[in-house]
Image: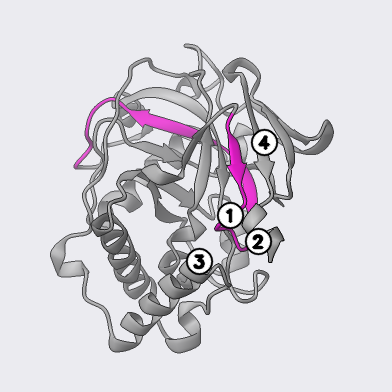
Amino acid sequence: MTRMGRYLPGVGLAAVQLLLASCTTASPQGGAYLRGFEAAESAGRPFAPITDSLPYADQAEAYRLQARLVARRVARGDKVAGYKGGLMSEASMRGRNVGEPLVGVLFASGRAASGDTVSLCGYRKASFEQKLGFVFARSVATLPADPAALAGAVGQVVPVVDLPDIAYRDPDHYGAVDMVAANISAARYVRGAAAAPAGTDLNGLKVSMTRDGQPLTSGFGRESMGEQWGSLHTAVRLILRSGRRIKAGDLVITGKIGDRGWLPPGDYRSDYGPLGVVAFRVAPCMSALAH
């Protein structure tokens, strides 16, 4: 067991600061993308990725657009609850032709607890990913020197099943820039109640999921960039580089464990071993069925 495979105790709750004002400008095409993205979200239909209208958009432009999406949502009354990593494996990065992972924002409105029912209302293409979440006990404004130093700011390690909405017009063809501009498809997430006991080997942790009692996927904690605390350090570096900072109570979730899957209605059970079980029911959207 590596030293960073161990959990350090503590607790916290909070929101997050948005990108620096100097980073929030976007091109006219970017403004049209934002309006189209929000209109598609409200109407429950897929959206056109940013590279459709801005084929040469880069990551800097994509993060500016992400920041504007976040700011607009906060202005409508939502709150930032933390961050999520994306493309947190060598294979995922190679598949999207990038050299580092991505980060997006989690909202308070998306949180569900183990035992809850999650409605498919509002989803276009619901999916699931098993992950680990790190709850910060204190704020982080500058990057600690290494994962060991960063661990001192973490209060709890908790199981989290991320439930993104892969709502691209073509859900099989999109790039890393499209992912960032769409806030890495962040939607809902189910947070388990149990924290990792002291001494838990997060890299060797085996996690498995079933739907209606049938196996779906399983994997190990090391699948997030080979090392959980190292992948958290990378995610925090990217969060801070984007102009944000982590506050006490923020939740940061690392890369997926096992395969991503689609999310039809049913009873889901994700077994995290010493971290307990995350169980939730997915219900069809009755208003959609009525139409």
Q: Would you name the residue on which mark 2 appears? A: 288
Answer whether residue 133 is magenta in the image.
yes
Looking at the image, which residue is at 33% across and 71% down?
Answer: 65
- Marks 4/2: CA distance? 18 Å
In the structure shown, which secondary structural element does the residue marked by tag 3 occupy? loop
Q: Earlier in the sequence, mark 1 or mark 3?
A: 3
Q: Amino acid at mark 3?
A: Val
Instruction: Specify the segment rendered in magenta.
Output: 116-141
Q: Check if mark 1's residue and mark 3's residue have beta carbons within 8 Å.
A: no
- Marks 2/1: CA distance? 7 Å
Q: Amino acid at mark 4?
A: Arg
Q: Check if mark 2's residue and mark 1's residue have beta carbons within 8 Å.
A: yes
Location of the N terminus by quadrant is top right
Work out whether residue 141 or residue 2 is closer to the camera in this orientation and state it: 141
- Marks 4/3: CA distance? 35 Å
- Marks 2/3: CA distance? 37 Å
User: Which disc number belongs to residue 251?
Assistant: none
Q: Check disc 4: other Cα within 10 Å, few if <14, some if 14-19, many if 20+.
A: some
Which mark's residue is nearer the viewer, 2 or 1?
2
User: Which disc number belongs to residue 98?
Assistant: 3
Q: Would you name the residue on which mark 1 appears? A: 121
Q: Amino acid at mark 2?
A: Ala
Residue 29 vertical placement versus 170 (above, below): below
Looking at the image, which residue is at 62% across and 40% down?
Answer: 223
Looking at the image, which residue is at 47% across and 56% down?
Answer: 101
Q: Earlier in the sequence, mark 4 or mark 1?
A: 1
Residue 131 position in % (x across, y down) = 56, 38
User: Which disc number belongs to residue 281?
Assistant: 4
